[in-house]
Amino acid sequence: MEKKPEAVKNPDLCRKPEPVKKPEEIKIAFHLNTLTHGGAERVVTNLANRFAAEGYQVFVATEWTDEDEFVLDERVHRIHVGLREGDEKRNRPSRYLRRIRYLEEFMEEYRPDVVVAFARLALFRALMAKKKTGIPVVVCVRIDPRSEYRGARNFFQIKKYMKTADGAVFQTKDAEDYFRKDLTCSSTIILNPITPKYLGLPPVKERNKTIVNAARLVAFKNQVLLVRAFSIVHEKHPDYDLKIYGPDSGDGTREKILQTIAECHLEGVVHLMGNSDALEKELPQAALFAYSSDYEGLPNSLLEAMAMGLPCVSTDCPCGGPGTLIQNGENGILVPVGDAEALAGGMLALIENPERAAELGRKAAKIAEIASTDRVFEAWQDYLLRVMAGQRNERR
């Protein structure tokens, strides 16, 4: 029997808590930098909209409010807590303190029952603001901490502030283990929710000869490696092409990919498709989905590809996101990080054995059973209610 990842892995959180307030009496605030493209931004939008639909008072406090990719429900209150006019002229330490002050002002004015902070900078700001406001803070780690939280400054902030968190949500056990010694609160593991449009798609009768990837063009996603791996595949199967979907991060990765395409003489065979909001229409017919990251949290695009029933091959990168979703050889293929030949081997194994590829795709689609929007929302709701109930008990 195949092993399935669980939406919530902390046994202490399995029992559904009794609400101490009605939803309309509870204020939940999410804090993050922005709502532009990104996995955290998508998850916050989905959660905020769902909590609002369930009757909760919901706030999303961001540093920036322009260039939004994700749309909030009209019942969600969007609050700007970033720098104000004239603040950019201040020095860096002063700007940092201003950001914390503005978050404190928001927390003092609206008095949410809990603040859920997504990603490194936001969670440190929220924990600092908690010191003055006393409002419970749940931190949510979204990416490999060994890469995202390295350096002396982050080490100092982890040691000083993580112990003050009232709750912590992780995407993988590896990330949870990294912070375990610094936490004094309970923690849990919750998968990302699958956007409903990727679920319940009609079965694919015949796949085309296209390999697909969907990820932001940024260094750690390592699409350069993917192109090099595909060049090996293309030597054996010149009738296949590669389509890479995703926005340009502006860090020079797009240019490096184009250079690699030229070096491998793959012009007209490897296509940079840009960003798309219709992947549920463009990906399902593909031969397979390939993922090449050096490190990750829990990759939404891999999760969605699996939910659509695509055969998947991915690097087994830290902090265990792909390994949380894929049981190697059961519902997908995992290969070592940074190994173009191994990644090519995984793709070739699927191309040259269509029956096996189809079976892996069918099993991959079962991820929808544990990462549906309803299942993930219930996990978040139960955990946040438990955190809030614990805080009320402490104040009695």
Image (tube, rainbow, N blue to C red):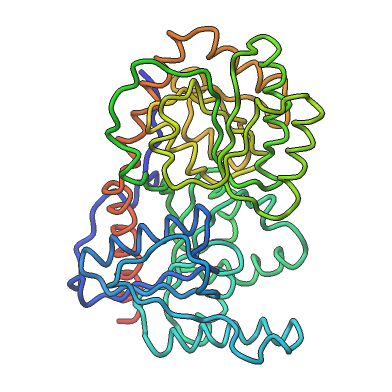
Q: Residue 211, percent across and down?
A: 55, 25
**From the viewer's perspective, is residue 319 above or below residue 387?**
above
Q: Residue 77, percent across and down?
A: 35, 77
User: Viewer-proximal residue, 166 or 265?
Assistant: 265
Residue farthest to the right, as pictured: 263
Tell me how many marks there are: 0
Q: Residue 214, percent across and down?
A: 54, 39
Specify whether 131 is left or right of 252.
left
Which residue is at 49% across, 23% downward?
Answer: 332
**From the viewer's perspective, is residue 267 above or below residue 330?**
below
Specify whether 238 is left or right of 60.
right
Q: Quadrant of the rendered structure where residue 213 is?
A: top right
Q: Quadrant of the rendered structure where residue 246 is?
A: top right
Specify whether 78 is left or right of 382.
right
Quarter in which the C terminus is drawn: bottom left
Which residue is at 42% across, 69% downward?
Answer: 30
Quarter in which the N terminus is drawn: top left
Q: Residue 391, percent across and down?
A: 35, 74
User: Viewer-proximal residue, 10 or 59?
Assistant: 59
User: Viewer-proximal residue, 190 or 31?
Assistant: 31
Residue farthest to the front, as pictured: 268
Specify whether 17 is left or right of 10.
left
Which residue is at 50% across, 80% downward?
Answer: 130
